[in-house]
Amino acid sequence: MDNVLDLFDQTVFDGERATGATNLLQVVWVYNRAIDIGGLLRFHRHLQQGRLSRRIERSPLPFGRHRWVRPDNGPELEVVSTSRPREEFDTWLSEQANTPLDAEHGPGWNLAVLPFSDGGGGVSLVISHCLADGVGLCEALADAASGRRDPVAWPVARSRRLRRALREDIRQTVRDLPAIRRAATAAIELARRGNDADTSGTAASAAPPVEADEVVSLPTATVFVDADEWDSRACALGGTANSLLAGLAGRIALRAGRLSADGSVALTLPVSVRTADDTRANAITNIDIAVDPHDAALDLRDIRVTVKQALIRSRDVTNERWELLPIAPLLPQWLIRRCVGVSAGSASSVISSNLGVVNPAAYRPDGTDADQFVIRTLGPGVTKATMHRLGGLLVVLAGRTRGRVFVSVLAYQPGDANTNDALRRNLSGALSDFLLTSTTGWACPEPVRAVQ
């Protein structure tokens, strides 16, 4: 098995190293009864034997491709001995999000369980995006819950002698040269178009200079919507479940003022290209579309057609940002920091990611169905300077489990309040635009009806 990192995986890793920020995924399970710790320990052991059980070993060449290796040791299951009120679960999840993780030195993930003082408990898994994307993570969770082991045996860390490592990595670079030349040509063309474009309407150009070492906390919000209601509303508006999410992302962007110069919203839709035997951490490509957010809550037909056409086009035309990946290993860290937004698109783009139907095994960490399941995107350690360089951030992630659709949002907009409460109001208002009912929190409260 070739253990050389895919170019996109290496770019994600190098981007984190250059900026000091860690892109994380957090899986949340909530049980309204006592959690079976024995079952959770089995789940944890299977995770250590599954596809998440690997780490990154750097090439000895400054421009070489990195490799997957077997971790020296795995993280222990973190069992909190003192229960906390359910109302403090969000606080605990934020604490878990700040768990030090390292895809190179380990640990790359951490599983923890918190008992609630009123009964039940919550489980959190935080993992570096360097190790898995959303679809790959769900597959790894389902494998662990079902007791399936990863058939891939990665090499032991530091198993290559220096001379052999240099020889192999130089050969790899030589094989990559044709792609590197094509990427350099594409980069020159992209830079030329960027210089010719009028960027006066982007959030990045309007951002004032800030101190590079000022770390910010990125606001997050999560809601649950009945899946039948989601599908019914999408159908009534002439759309699909996926185009409804794109429309919702557009309305959130509209409320946040995250618009392109022409008033449209630049949406980036990650599309999974994962195959059955895929060993990539991030097996995705992106499609980029522009949507009009103003009428999205009234009619989804235009968005549906635009998404469909973009998906068809992506089968034949490679995303031009992916064409730049071969030169990523050659870039120094200062230049990577300058180019860190290349995978996200324009300075005002919005990421709308739909995981679809999650394998039911993924929400059985103790062997039984959890009452609630969510996957969230997190960005601990990011600085205000990075956010202003990117022009801010808006990520909308959704998935379907147990008859409900969860929607989690991560956002930062230069010049705005950037609080959890403000983001919740924005998300709630966008859902009301679509006349959708949502619930929040972890106690399964009665839904609050949208304002008609």
Image (cartoon, rainbow, N blue to C red):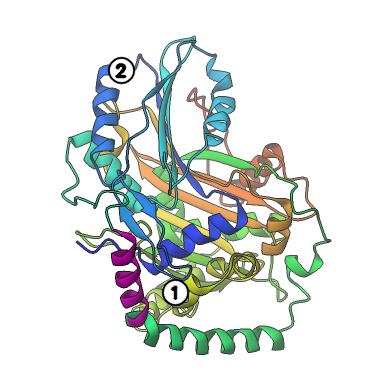
Residue receiving disc 1: 305
Residue receiving disc 2: 37
| In the depicted structure, whether residue 387 falls above or below residue 367 | below
Q: Nearer the viewer, residue 236 or 18?
A: 18
Q: The N terminus appears in which quarter of the rendering? A: bottom left
Is 283 situated left or right of 320 in this image? left
Q: Amino acid at mark 2?
A: Ile
Q: Quadrant of residue 219?
A: top right
Q: Nearer the viewer, mark 1 or mark 2?
A: 2
| In the depicted structure, whether residue 289 falls above or below residue 25 | below
Extent of the magenta region: 161-174
Q: Amino acid at mark 1?
A: Val
Instruction: State the SS at label 2.
Output: helix
Q: Residue at x 59, y 67 (%)?
A: 336
Badge 1: residue crowd in 10 Å (few <14, some 14–19, many ≥20): few
Residue 235, visible in the rendered structure: no
